[in-house]
Image: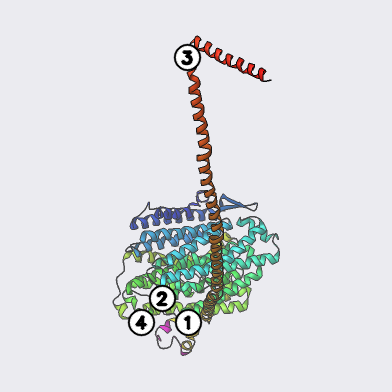
Amino acid sequence: MIGTSIFWLAPILPITVFVLLAVGLVRYGRFASGVAIVAMASAFLVSTLGLVATMQGARGALSLPWMTVGGRHLTLALQLDPLSSLVATIVAGVGLIIFVYAANYMAQDPRRGRFFAEFSLFAGSMLTLVLAGDIMTLFIAWELVGLCSYLLIGFWYERPTAPAAATKAFLITRLADLVLLAGILLLIGTVGSGQIETLLFAATHGKIAPGLLLTIALLLFIGAAGKSAQVPFQGWLPDAMAGPTPVSALLHSATMVVAGVFLVARLYPLFVIASPVLQVVAWVGVATALLGGAAALVELDLKRTLAYSTMSQIGLMFVGLGSGSLLAGVLLLLAQAVYKATLFLAAGIVDHAVEGTEFERMGGLFRRMPWTTTAFAIGAVALAGLPVTLALPAKDPVLTAAWLDNLPLFVVTLIASVLTALYSMRTFGLVFLGRSSHAAQNAHSVSRGLLLPLVVMAALIPIVLLANASLFAQPLAHLLGVPAPDVPAATALTLIVAFVGSAAGLGARFLWPQALIWPMLKRVSPLLEGEFGLKAVYRFIAQSGLWTINALGIFDRVVFDAFVGLLVKVIRTFSQRCSTVDRHVFDAGATSIAQAVLALARVSGRFDLRGFDASIQTFGQDVLALSRRVRLWQTGRIENYMLAVFIWGGGVVFIAVVVLIVR
């Protein structure tokens, strides 16, 4: 089928746009946004075709060899199955609408070309993560998502809060990612392969020792908790609102913060075997849901309230997964992607209209912004857990799973659901109802380019939530290959607390700002603002770290610097002494020897010049003189030669006669 043969284009298309923008082949901001939107639309089409193919039983896979480490062959792989195709379709669909919104939101920004390059890489990395068929491919995409979040949160780097927020998010998530990497390497080292299907087969067929499997599952969940801002890694998420609103919308709805939930869902058979870790998943999730809901009740900033809301909803997803229901976690993930994107897009419009996100600048905006009010109301109703059209609340499967798994967990989850309804309606009331502030009375008009994506996104909420109705639960459960539990009592109780909480939240709007709903809530608001003391703990840890660094700095200056200084002085003194000895002993001796050799050479030169050379010259001159005399005898005349013979012969005879006479 065509969907299984081209599914790999879904992540490739946005990443290609990033490359084109990064190398400068596409430079103009408006054209850049158009290319990015076309790429996301194509990715959505490809993902939809893949989803249709998987619904008909088809599967797809693509694998490329990467490297060999220690005899183990690692690959870069993508795979198409029901879970990956379903989540990829939501990521691409929600991403497409947010891209259209961002094109209008960032239209006047001089760096919009760079923005869409990073934004496209962000979406492409998340699609790669979702479709990964190999755990190392998943981890690479995981890190790219984290890098893009750092770049996008700090996009407006000229604002003091943006770089600090980006750095905070990057460091906290990297800490959890180190733990995740340890779990991945341990898993690959044990099984000998990075293929997800091979890893899950080994986990479910007893190929991994139980104790080791528990350790691996716990390490993997810690990594997931860091990426999804769960306790104790939740501190970075509210500050991440320093980035542009489209970044917040995509980050909170369909990319980074749901990546941890998807990781647990992707490796869910492994976690099922390591059942004690599932209990940890559930209780960490419900603790985060309580913490996020409580903090959202007293937050005074719209975008930060929505950030705490995301923490709470992600926590509920982990409750569903930890309670043994893959269906509950995945369905809430899908619903959250749509209604949280709607809320953030509306928040961006409100921010543009009143030039701020503080609640004190809002109120009564429904008079000037009816479309935004309607869209936000639909999102808030869905977030609160109230029925939209004929659909059951998105949280109902989570609460049903908790009911069946652990009654105390269900009770705490129910409390978290009440808090969700409270802060959802409180936020809606503070922004759109009641008396208008001065800024709200002078709110700017909003372009249709921003309103249209918001309206489309809000219209999708009933459609997506309809998947939770009993009519569609079974087909979706069949697609995922999991059961679809149904507990009417849990559903009824869920609806009751949603209605009660929503009514209380709306009522709180008209008590604001006297007592933050009730005088008791006002007394405990410092505790809620401090996240039940966690901020103090983090502050203490940070201060302890700074104290430790300062102490190490002092120790370094007092001990190491002093020791190094003393060592330098000793070495310098020793080198000076060595230099003195070298100059006065070795250099002086060498100089004396050289001078003596030069003197001897001069004497030898004089003797050679005046002795040997003179003697040789004198001998040569004598030989020349003798030769000149002898040459006189060489006349060439016979008579001269005969005379010479006669003289020499006569002389010889004379000498002989004399000798004979004497004897």
**Which comes sooner in the sequence, label 3 or label 2?**
2
CA separation in Å, label 4 and label 1: 24 Å
Q: Residue at x 67, y 17 (%)?
A: 660
Which of discs 3 and 2 lies nearer the camera? The answer is: 3
Above or below residue 431? Residue 639 is above
- Within 10 Å of disc 4 (Cα), the crowding (few <14, some 14-19, many 20+) is some
**Percent x, y for residue 138?**
55, 59
**Percent x, y for residue 512?**
40, 85
Which of discs 4 and 3 lies nearer the camera? The answer is: 3
Image coloring type: rainbow
Q: Which mark is residue 434?
A: 4
Q: Which sits in the foreground, 394 or 661?
A: 661
Above or below residue 56? Residue 334 is below
**Residue 69 seen in the current view:** yes
Residues at circles 4 and 3 in contact by the CB criterion of under 8 Å: no
Residue that mark 2 sits on: 302
CA separation in Å, label 4 and label 2: 16 Å
Residue that mark 3 sits on: 635
Residues at circles 4 and 2 in contact by the CB criterion of under 8 Å: no
Residue stretch in magenta: 506-519
